[in-house]
Image (cartoon, rainbow, N blue to C red):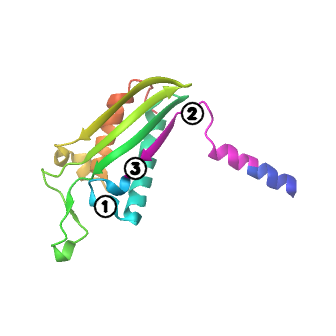
């Protein structure tokens, strides 16, 4: 019984810990409680947003980065698409999308491989044309405009590194 338990735990560790040959994305939200978007000021909303954006960026890393590379991303500020308009009694928690309220993410990244820096920069991503993105508008996923903007950025910055998976 102890042998089976030890074998099970060993397999579990192997399944959870990525191997050195896999690409990895580490996302850190720097001062998220002070981000421009008001949803980051609520601890529960902030936790859900940071978890979802981290998960999504990790997925993109698995798709676009070659094995063995590490991408560290510091998210410095976020403004989600649209704005809450609390004066609307019937829709106080609904984000109203307007041309003047595009998604915006300010970030800093370092792409490295075996301790050697391959690329690094600080950028502000902004999608003024987000309302014209039909796939995001018709998406049922959470944060569709932000994810479309991050997906496009990731593909432009790192798409040349590895074939699509």
C-beta proximity under 8 Å, tags 1 and 2 = no
In percent of the image, x 40 and y 64: which residue is there?
43
Q: What element carries label 1?
A: helix
Q: In this view, does 47 lie to the left or right of 156?
A: right
Q: Distance between the residues labelled 1 and 2?
A: 33 Å
Residue 29 in the magenta stretch? The answer is yes
* Residue interval drawn in magenta: 10-31
Q: Distance between the residues labelled 1 and 3?
A: 14 Å
Q: Is residue 24 left or right of residue 96?
A: right
Q: Is residue 115 left or right of residue 121?
A: right
Residue designated by label 1:
39
From the image, state whether disc 3 or disc 2 is nearer to you: 3
In percent of the image, x 81 and y 51: which residue is there?
6
Mark 1 and mark 2 lie on one chain; the one further toward the N terminus is: 2
Residue 134 in the magenta stretch? The answer is no
Where is residue 55 shown, x and y percent of the image? Answer: 45, 48
Q: How far apart are marks 3 and 2 (CA)?
A: 20 Å
Mark 1 and mark 3 lie on one chain; the one further toward the N terminus is: 1
* Residue 53: mark in rendering: 3
Where is residue 28 shown, x and y percent of the image? Answer: 44, 45
Q: Residues within 10 Å of mark 2 (few under 14, many from 20)?
A: some
Q: How crowded is mark 3: few (under 14 residues within 10 Å), some or many (20 or more)?
A: some
* Residue 22: mark in rendering: 2
């Amino acid at each position: 019984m102890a042998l089976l338990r030890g074998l099970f735990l060993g397999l579990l560790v192997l399944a959870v810990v990525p191997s050195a040959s896999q690409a990895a994305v580490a996302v850190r939200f720097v001062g998220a409680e002070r981000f421009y978007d008001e949803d980051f000021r609520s601890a529960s909303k902030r936790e859900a947003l940071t978890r979802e954006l981290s998960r999504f960026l990790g997925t993109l890393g698995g798709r676009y980065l070659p094995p063995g590379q590490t991408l560290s991303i510091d998210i410095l500020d976020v403004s989600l698409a649209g704005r809450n308009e609390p004066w609307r009694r019937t829709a106080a928690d609904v984000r109203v999308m307007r041309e003047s309220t595009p998604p915006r993410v300010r970030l800093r990244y370092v792409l490295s491989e075996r301790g050697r820096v391959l690329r690094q920069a600080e950028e502000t991503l902004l999608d003024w044309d987000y309302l014209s993105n039909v796939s995001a508008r018709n998406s049922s996923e959470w944060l569709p405009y932000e994810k479309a903007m991050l997906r496009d950025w990731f593909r432009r910055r790192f798409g040349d590194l590895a074939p699509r998976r």
